Image: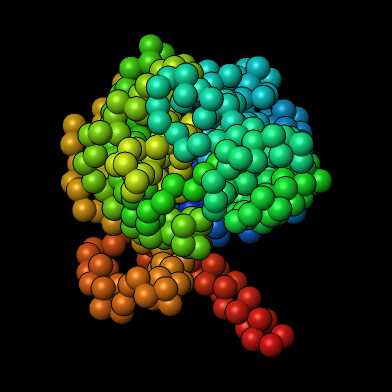
Amino acid sequence: MRRTDGGSSLPPAIVLGGEANALSIGRSLARYGVSVYAINDPSSPTRFSRHIRWIPMPAHSTPDDWRRFLLEPPSERLRGAVLLAASDAALEFVATYRSELAPLYRIDISDTKAQLCMLDKLCTYQAAVAAGVPTPRFWSVASEADVTAVRDELVYPLIVKPRHSHIFEARFGRKFFMAGTFDETVNAVAVAHEGGTSVVLMEMIPGADDQLCSFYTYLDEHGRPMFEFTKRIIRRYPVNMGSATYHVTDHIPELREPALALLRHVGLQGVANVEFKLDARDGTLRLIECNARFTASNELLARAGFDLAVWVYRRILGDDPKMPDSYQAGLHLWSPTGDFRAFLALRAAGQLGWLGWIRGLLHRQAFAIMDWRDPMPSVVAHWRMGRKALAILIRR
């Protein structure tokens, strides 16, 4: 194991929440010589990695369960560990209980007000408008009366988007609702509110998924970006609304100005990812969302030489690590099963053929979960998918 200057072993790391990103964080830190622990849902791929020590939690554990564990005697052996958030729920948890956690664990710098604003889509869009960053058209609604009041302004198709994605997805098992008419909009808003979630109406920016692109950085205590990295999405599943299944590194300098304008306006510190979509109507880059945490494509950054997990870990310990000044464009991160489903959907719509899909895969690939040196997370994931598919066939 690597040693600090004082000769003691590096402190362990605890990764809170997350899926593929948590797995990437754990693998990176373990290679660096850190003992990595995971607090997560039992279905998380981190549970099955040989690089990560699983901390048992109740099924469908909540932040209250995390708090009880981290602040009470069962976690005493982990006092002084580096605490890293890998999901929106984890980020909200650390921001909410930071004053209680900070005396016991090592936590990265942050402006908790800014972090919580970036978790709230309405707050994010309002901040972007104030910072002069283009956004989709959006409307804040809390009732049928609110929807009626803006009826003549609405454009379809319309995204009924949760203000807090992690709460909505836990309740409904999806990222948002789509509405094609006024009545569908009213109904979707009612369903969301009955489920205890607040929403914002947002126009759907036209254009394919490959018009989505992201800017990554880390802002220090003075708001200075410590590095800059950009990438594009090639495909998502479900198409136009799901998670990315194929990413590629790219140099997109035009993302820098609007991304930093938003981040500096809210005063964000630490890890930051800002996603935009190029509007096919006028060529404007419009804000989609901002994440103040490690994202699903973390492994792509690591493969490009931007090992964010190790870099943040070292910075929390007081080191002054350096990121590369440049990176190679054209590095790919692929989720094979999801991307095959995306291809089938695009093929059915007449937008992508077999030859085009295969030709687009003729690159050296990095994988979100699959790693021959740590195979069990991928094995378990595929076994579960196979079991689910078999159950569907049997019911039919």
Residue at point 77% right, 46% down? 190
Which quarter of the picture shows residue 75? top right
| Left or right, 34 with reference to 73 | left
Query: Depth check: 318 or 239 in front?
Result: 239
Where in the figure is residue 371, as x and y percent of width and height? 39, 62
**Up-down relation of residue 81 to residue 389 (above or below):** above
Residue 355 lies left or right of residue 159; in this view the side is: left
Question: Is 185 in front, or is 268?
Answer: 185
268 vs 306, left or right, is right
Residue at 46%, 43% (x, y): give it.
295
Q: How is the image coloured?
A: rainbow
The structure residue drawn at horizontal position 33% and vertical position 72%, both measured from the top left corner, is 352
Residue at the outermost right position: 194
Q: Is residue 46 above or below residue 260?
A: below
**Quick check: can you spot residue 101?**
no
Q: What residue is rendered at 45% in x and 34% in y?
A: 135
Q: Nearer the viewer, residue 216 or 232?
A: 232
Q: Position of residue 388 (x, y in %)?
A: 63, 76
Q: Is there any visible trace of residue 284 in the rendered image?
A: yes
- Up the image or down, 334 lies above or below 194; here it is below
Q: x and y percent of residue 361 in the render?
A: 27, 68
Q: Position of residue 353 (x, y in %)?
A: 31, 77
180 up-or-down from 384: above or below = above
